[in-house]
Image (spheres, grey):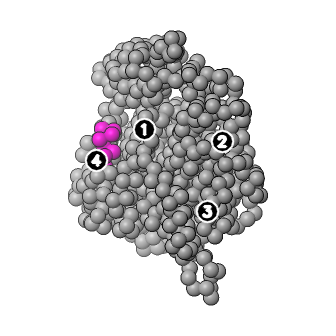
């Protein structure tokens, strides 16, 4: 049924659906083997970015299967029919005037023709050519020169394929890359969704359907992050895993290097300071580097030099065809520790209080597409705000964003796309198996990042349902097994007494919207209800608590006194009521507060939303509302109370 809905999201005959399911049996994607190092140029590695204009075509055929029936991947896409220009990275939804494309569900096709350097083609024995997609929503099948090279289930995370055999065996340097994407969400995807068929033909055209979801952000789709080609030697560094510790004046960087392509090789490692000085050396695939007087990685506003990074240079040497082959990869490394007690969250042994935001990858026109200008603006606003942290609500953010978190000292709660899990069928074995794969991919991607201090496996699931107990026990245990160095949580809005997943988390994360979704308009009940919330959760579980969401909608420029809902005055009044309780409880077991949301963002249309969710303290165009100034005053006050120094942030070119 899962494959059926992806390929046939319309009311079609059983024969057509079955035939298309046979065509797409490959929809059962498994976790990728090996590593997923971020592509970086080095003396042994070259990189070719494929960002820019691609050819694009949405398949509007009744069964959304025309591209497969006619095998659009076998020839240039323009020969299949009309194509349009489509930028990559970007969401496709809002780049045309066609409302059908904005709300489109089904298969879309992208294509890019590129010329490869001759050196890549003439070194078949010594050079690998790899195609990497930063993320695409949600199910992807990739062909190169008409040959399928990989497929991937899920958005927000990278995938890649070795295409050496195809491009090095071709007669020319032209490489045609075709990517088919399907954005259909089913009860077993992450995030989940469902297709609803409207069968009343007096109200809807025949075959009419809608994609339903139970999350409150727009379901943008497309190739959202960079697509690149890169090379490595045939014997190459496939993965690096780093963990760090320190005691006294000694820092430890433990490492494990995975090499692929040969079992006979040598490895040398140099750990360099930012200025280039070598502070430790090592050899072999497993070991530990000792750093005297280490410069620790500290969060923003917790130290005068936050986000300090060392650089681990790994050099591989091997004999290939009687000649010496070398591969070099450099990994940024931050030395820091994370520990959770019954009442505190410790970074480098010192109590850390999260005062930050929840965000979205969301902006006008480009949707969820990576945008460097927007990224830099957001980090400048985080600095201005005095925010030391954010949660990647509700999915993993781009690696380029995470790089800046490492470099700037912004602490991250790294969340998977487990949002909208509100129905019992979202907790079955198929969903669980996919959830485990997603966590493997997320940990594999972000395991070496000092900014990532905690994994979040879901947001606001129906954790009061009985299947949630086994489900979250399994997901959390699996995540801890593949990364025992970080705490694990999920974000709850369930009743504390009926939350079946809470016993398995390390930190309680709670969302609540008193005087908004509860007792709307009644500011006077916030403090009592919030205080009761904290006391109930702590009494039940004896674990530190983060207020992971709170806030209210406000329309920029809408004013009313006394404060009324949707005015800027009401927005700020809600925040101040919450802050009064935070100030009492943070002296005890509350370890953080994350406002919802950093900026206004787009949602599905509905009578409760006027061009999106307006809970941002900034508008979607990143202009501050009154709430931003309230939060700024508070965050800098919290920093000053901790005797923190305000650093000057500079961009670290990674």
Nearer the N terminus, badge 4 or badge 3? 3
User: Can residue 91 be seen by looking at this rendering?
Assistant: no
Q: Which residue is mark 2?
A: 145
SS for tag 3?
Answer: loop
Residue drawn at (67%, 53%), measured in percent from left and top? 72
Q: Residues within 10 Å of mark 3 (few under 14, many from 20)?
A: many
> Is the C-beta separation of discs 2 and 1 under 8 Å?
no
Q: Which residue is mark 3?
A: 65
Nearer the N terminus, badge 2 or badge 1? 1
Q: Which residue is mark 4?
A: 477
Which dot, 1 or 3, sits closer to the camera? 3
Q: Which mark is residue 33?
A: 1
Q: Residue furthest bottom?
A: 202
Instruction: Give the Cα distance between marks 4 and 3.
Output: 40 Å
Relative to residue 67, is residue 127 depicted above or below? above
Instruction: Give the Cα distance between marks 1 and 3.
Output: 30 Å
Which dot, 4 or 2, sits closer to the camera? 2
In the rendered structure, does residue 635 fall within the stretch colored magenta?
no
Q: Quadrant of the C terminus?
A: top right
Front residue of 107/373: it is 107
Front residue of 207/623: it is 207
Front residue of 275/142: it is 142
Q: Which mark is residue 634?
A: none
> Is the C-beta separation of discs 4 and 2 under 8 Å?
no
List x then y, in percent, for residue 605: 60, 70
Judge from the rendering whether residue 244 lies leftward or rightward of residue 604; answer left or right: left
Instruction: Give the Cα distance between marks 2 and 3.
Output: 20 Å
Residue drawn at (35%, 68%), measured in percent from left and top? 424
From the image, give the main secondary structure of the stretch colored magenta: helix
């Amino acid at each position: 049924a899962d494959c059926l809905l992806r390929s046939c999201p319309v009311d079609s005959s059983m024969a057509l659906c079955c035939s298309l399911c046979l065509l797409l049996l490959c929809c059962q994607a498994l976790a990728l083997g090996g590593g997923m190092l971020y592509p970086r140029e080095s003396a042994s590695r070259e990189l070719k970015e494929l960002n820019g204009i691609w050819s694009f075509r949405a398949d509007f055929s009744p069964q959304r299967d025309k591209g497969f029936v006619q095998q659009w991947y076998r020839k240039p896409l323009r020969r299949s029919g009309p194509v349009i220009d489509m930028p990559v990275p970007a969401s496709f939804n809002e780049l045309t005037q066609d409302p059908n494309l904005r709300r489109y569900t089904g298969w879309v096709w992208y294509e890019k023709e590129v010329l490869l350097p001759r050196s890549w083609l003439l070194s078949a024995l010594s050079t690998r050519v790899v195609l990497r997609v930063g993320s695409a929503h949600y199910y992807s099948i990739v062909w190169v020169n008409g040959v399928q090279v990989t497929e991937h289930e899920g958005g927000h995370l990278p995938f890649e394929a070795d295409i050496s055999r195809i491009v090095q065996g071709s007669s020319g340097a032209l490489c045609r890359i075709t990517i088919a994407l399907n954005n259909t969400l089913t009860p077993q995807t992450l995030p989940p969704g469902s297709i609803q068929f409207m069968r009343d033909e007096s109200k809807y055209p025949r075959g009419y359907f809608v994609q339903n979801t139970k999350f409150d952000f727009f379901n943008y789709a497309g190739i959202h992050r960079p697509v690149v080609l890169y090379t490595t030697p045939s014997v190459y560094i496939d993965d690096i895993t780093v963990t760090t510790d320190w005691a006294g004046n000694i820092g430890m960087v433990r490492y494990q290097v995975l090499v692929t392509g040969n079992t006979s090789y040598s490895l040398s490692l140099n750990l360099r300071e930012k200025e280039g000085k070598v502070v430790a050396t090592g050899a072999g695939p497993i070991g530990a580097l000792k750093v005297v007087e280490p410069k620790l990685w500290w969060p923003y506003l917790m130290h005068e030099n936050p986000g300090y990074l060392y650089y681990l240079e790994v050099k591989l040497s091997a004999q290939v065809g009687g000649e010496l082959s070398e591969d070099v990869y450099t990994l940024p490394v931050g030395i820091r520790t994370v520990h959770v007690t019954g009442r505190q969250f410790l970074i480098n042994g010192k109590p850390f209080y999260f005062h930050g935001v929840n965000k979205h990858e969301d902006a006008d026109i480009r949707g969820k597409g990576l945008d460097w200008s927007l990224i830099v603006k957001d980090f400048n606003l985080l600095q201005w705000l005095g925010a030391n942290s954010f949660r990647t609500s509700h999915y993993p953010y781009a690696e380029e964003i995470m790089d800046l978190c490492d470099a700037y000292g912004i602490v991250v709660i790294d969340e998977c796309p487990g949002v909208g899990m509100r129905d019992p069928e979202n907790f079955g074995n198929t969903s669980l198996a996919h959830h485990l794969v997603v966590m493997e991919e997320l940990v594999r991607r972000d395991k070496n990042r000092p900014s990532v201090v905690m994994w979040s496996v879901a947001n606001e699931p129906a954790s009061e349902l009985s299947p949630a107990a086994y489900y979250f026990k399994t997901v959390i245990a699996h995540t801890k097994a593949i990364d025992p160095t970080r705490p694990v949580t999920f974000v709850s809005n369930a009743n504390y007494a009926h939350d079946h997943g809470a016993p398995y988390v390390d930190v309680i994360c709670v969302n609540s919207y008193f005087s908004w979704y509860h007792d709307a308009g009644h500011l006077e009940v916030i403090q009592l209800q919030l205080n009761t919330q904290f006391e109930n959760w702590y009494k039940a579980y004896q674990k530190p608590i983060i207020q992971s969401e709170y806030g209210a909608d406000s329309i920029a420029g809408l004013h009313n006194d006394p404060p009324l809902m949707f005015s800027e005055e009401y927005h700020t009044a809600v925040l101040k009521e919450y802050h009064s309780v935070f100030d009492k409880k943070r002296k005890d077991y509350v370890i953080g507060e994350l406002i919802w949301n950093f900026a206004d963002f787009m949602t599905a249309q509905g009578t409760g939303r006027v061009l999106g969710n307006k809970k941002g303290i900034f508008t979607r165009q990143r202009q501050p509302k009154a709430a931003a100034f309230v939060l700024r005053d508070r965050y800098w006050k919290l920093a000053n109370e901790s005797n923190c120094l305000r650093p000057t942030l500079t961009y670290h070119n990674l």
